[in-house]
Image: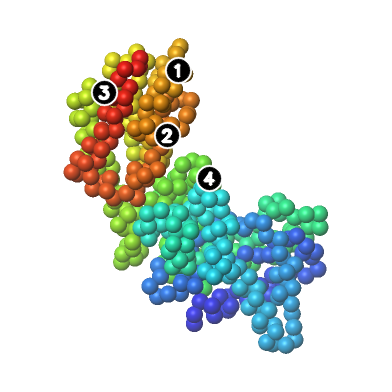
């Protein structure tokens, strides 16, 4: 039996029960239930079979239409086509012909929401350089490879503008009836996922444990692991990506899950193992680069201060100019991990004449380094838009560390700044 047949077999009776329980409600402005939806490539024998489970949908007000599609009929063919129509209610979202609606209409483009997490995870799992390329459909097979489900099939009443016609009492009846859909066993029975990633932190894990006798194992803060022995299903349960983003935890959470997938040998192999190898190598490579920079800095009368450059969020590597009455430094920075590389001039003592000095520094450096972002807390700051912008996607940077080329390139820019500013009162 293929997935489509299993889906109909499992969910058609649930939809029927749901419809019967909400007879008589005013469905105007109320949400239709979200049923799991999957890409056309999920059933491919070579697919890794990953399911992402969120919390709820948003801006869902189509219960009236959902009920209309399901309409009961004494004619079997019509009745069966009606059931098929509501079971395929969400399929359009995964249509390649429609441009993968979930990739364009359901997220905030920052990468810090539910879909952003999915795109970032998939880019790492499949070892692609940029999650935005995954989102934009450069690799359509990836966007057709997974299942999307929700813990709660009916969203909260207040999450969407219900208008004046929606009634909370009617909503409560619909919400109660929707609980029939909310068991992990339906998802597992239909899709047989190897991995389920749940993105909604809560104390109550009955969605999973009511069907299976598995227990949570804490593998990181806000990240639990479960294993369903009978189906060999691995579940990673974490917080909503909004919380993860606010706490700067999305990259760490993805990395921990990828490492666990590798350690538990869930697959014989998967593309993300190459990404994982680089992740393990790069801290050592960065230390090598820093030692090279320190040696060249000493030769140029510069003192080095390393503020965990290349680790976690914002991080910096300073070259302190000596002598300097204003405590002036030339600085390398990353905004996140090895992304958004910048070079700047920082002045600690911004006393009398600082504004004039800042303008002079900017005028001297723009022609040789590039535009100044004009941040008040920096005497000068330039973000690179070329190959140096994102080191994570630039293998030449890492290959150049061993040969010393990367250190020479970076120190060349430091020397250019030194030479340009040598006549200023720093």
Picture coordinates of residue 87, whole percent (x, y): 62, 73
Instruction: Give the number of the disc on residue 371.
Output: 2
Determine whether label 3 and label 4 are within 8 Å by CB: no
Q: Secondary structure at mark 2?
A: loop
Q: Nearer the viewer, residue 135 or 178?
A: 135
In the rendered image, which residue does mark 1 sit on? Answer: 356
In the rendered image, which residue does mark 3 sit on? Answer: 303
In the image, which is nearer the foreground, mark 3 or mark 4?
A: 3
- Marks 3/1: CA distance? 26 Å
> Counting other residues with Cα less than 10 Å from the Cα at mark 3, is it few (<14), some (14-19), or many (20 or more)?
some
Q: Secondary structure at mark 3?
A: strand
In the rendered image, which residue does mark 4 sit on? Answer: 243
- Marks 2/1: CA distance? 18 Å
- Marks 3/4: CA distance? 39 Å
Colour scheme used in the picture? rainbow
Residue 383 in the figure: left or right of residue 208: left
In the image, which is nearer the foreground, mark 3 or mark 2?
A: 2
Sequence-wise, the earlier of marks 3 and 4 is 4
What residue is drawn where x is 38% and y is 60%?
126
- Marks 3/2: CA distance? 26 Å
- Residue placed furthest toward the front: 367
What residue is drawn where x is 19% and y is 40%?
404
Quarter assignment of residue 364: top left
In the image, which is nearer the foreground, mark 3 or mark 1?
A: 1
What residue is drawn where x is 62% and y is 58%?
57
Picture coordinates of residue 284, whole percent (x, y): 24, 42
- Marks 1/4: CA distance? 42 Å
Query: Is 323 located above or below residue 387 in the figure?
Result: above
């Amino acid at each position: 039996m293929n997935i489509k047949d299993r889906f109909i077999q499992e969910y058609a009776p649930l939809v029927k029960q749901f419809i019967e329980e909400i007879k008589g409600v005013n469905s105007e402005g109320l949400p239709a239930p979200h049923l799991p939806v999957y890409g056309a490539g999920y059933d491919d024998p070579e697919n890794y079979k990953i399911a992402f489970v969120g919390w709820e949908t948003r801006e869902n007000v189509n219960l009236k239409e959902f009920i209309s599609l399901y309409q009961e009929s004494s004619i079997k063919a019509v009745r069966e086509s009606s059931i098929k129509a509501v079971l395929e209610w969400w399929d359009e979202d995964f249509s390649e012909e429609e441009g993968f609606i979930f990739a364009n209409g359901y997220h905030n483009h920052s990468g810090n929401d539910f879909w952003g997490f999915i795109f970032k995870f998939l880019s790492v799992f499949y070892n692609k350089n940029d999650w935005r390329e995954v989102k934009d459909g450069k690799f359509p097979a990836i966007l057709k490879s997974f299942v999307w489900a929700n813990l709660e099939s009916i969203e909260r009443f207040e999450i969407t503008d219900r208008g004046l016609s929606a009634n909370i009492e009617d909503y409560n009846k619909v919400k109660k009836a929707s609980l029939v859909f909310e068991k992990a066993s339906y998802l597992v029975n239909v899709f047989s996922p190897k991995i389920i990633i749940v993105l909604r932190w809560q104390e109550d894990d009955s969605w999973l444990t009511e069907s299976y006798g598995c227990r949570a194992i804490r593998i990181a803060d806000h990240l639990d692991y479960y294993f369903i022995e009978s189906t060999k299903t691995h579940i990673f349960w974490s917080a909503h990506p909004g919380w993860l983003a606010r706490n700067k935890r999305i990259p760490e959470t993805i990395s921990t899950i990828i490492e666990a997938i590798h350690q538990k040998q869930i697959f014989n192999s998967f593309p993300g193992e190459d990404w994982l190898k680089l992740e393990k190598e790069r801290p050592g490579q960065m230390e090598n680069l820093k030692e090279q920079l320190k040696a060249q800095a000493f030769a140029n009368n510069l003192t080095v201060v390393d503020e965990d450059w290349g680790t976690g969020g914002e991080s910096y590597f300073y070259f302190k100019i000596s002598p300097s009455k204003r405590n002036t430094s030339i600085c390398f920075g990353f905004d996140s991990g090895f992304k958004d590389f910048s070079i700047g001039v920082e002045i600690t003592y911004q006393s009398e004449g600082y504004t004039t000095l800042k303008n002079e520094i900017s005028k001297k450096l723009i022609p040789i380094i590039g535009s100044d972002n004009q941040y008040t807390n920096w005497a000068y700051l330039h973000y690179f838009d070329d190959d140096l912008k994102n080191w994570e996607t630039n293998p030449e940077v890492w290959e150049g560390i061993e040969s010393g080329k990367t250190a020479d390139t970076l120190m060349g820019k430091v020397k250019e700044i030194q030479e340009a500013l040598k006549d200023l009162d720093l």
